[in-house]
Image: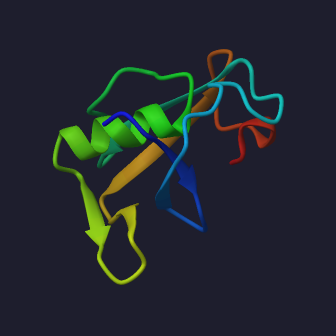
Amino acid sequence: MAAALRRIGTGAFRPDPPAPAFVNGNAGCHYRIEVFGEARSPWRPSPAEAMEDAIRLGLASWDEGAHEYYLAVPVDMAVRFDGRAGHARCGR
């Protein structure tokens, strides 16, 4: 998928024009897709790239009414900052 995806709400993403991987000072943040805590994708520098992995793996669902992708339980987007799990600077 060529277009970046923008997070809108909890677990929802909408197609958006490409943007730099590090937005809002999130350099050092990495994202990956997990199912029941098991990694399904490598760490990526942006949530949009991680969401593209979920779409490619068939783990993201499309909401036709809202025209956005979302992750349903048990799929999650894990976040780390320079090797540490979850960090306020990374949006979680």
| 22 versus 50 height, above or below | above
User: Quadrant of the image for the N terminus?
Assistant: top left
**Camera-nearest residue between 73 and 36:** 73
Residue sticking out furthest to the left: 58
The quarter of the displayed image where residue 40 is located: top left
Tell me if I can see residue 32 in this picture: no
How was the colour assigned to the protein in this rendering? rainbow
Q: State the image coordinates of residue 23 (x, y, percent, origin top left).
A: 74, 32
29 vs 41, left or right, is right
The residue under the point 18% across, 40% down is: 57
The residue under the point 45% across, 21% down is: 43
Q: State the image coordinates of residue 30 (x, y, percent, origin top left).
A: 57, 25
| 42 versus 5 height, above or below | above
The residue under the point 62% across, 25% down is: 21
82 vs 61, left or right, is right
Q: State the image coordinates of residue 59 (x, y, percent, origin top left).
A: 22, 51
54 vs 6, left or right, is left
**Camera-nearest residue between 6 and 91:** 6
1 vs 57, left or right, is right
| 73 versus 42 height, above or below | below
The residue under the point 59% across, 64% down is: 8
Tell me if I can see residue 61 in this picture: yes
The quarter of the displayed image where residue 86 is located: top right
Q: State the image coordinates of residue 64 (x, y, percent, origin top left).
A: 29, 77
* Callout count: 0
Residue sticking out furthest to the front: 17
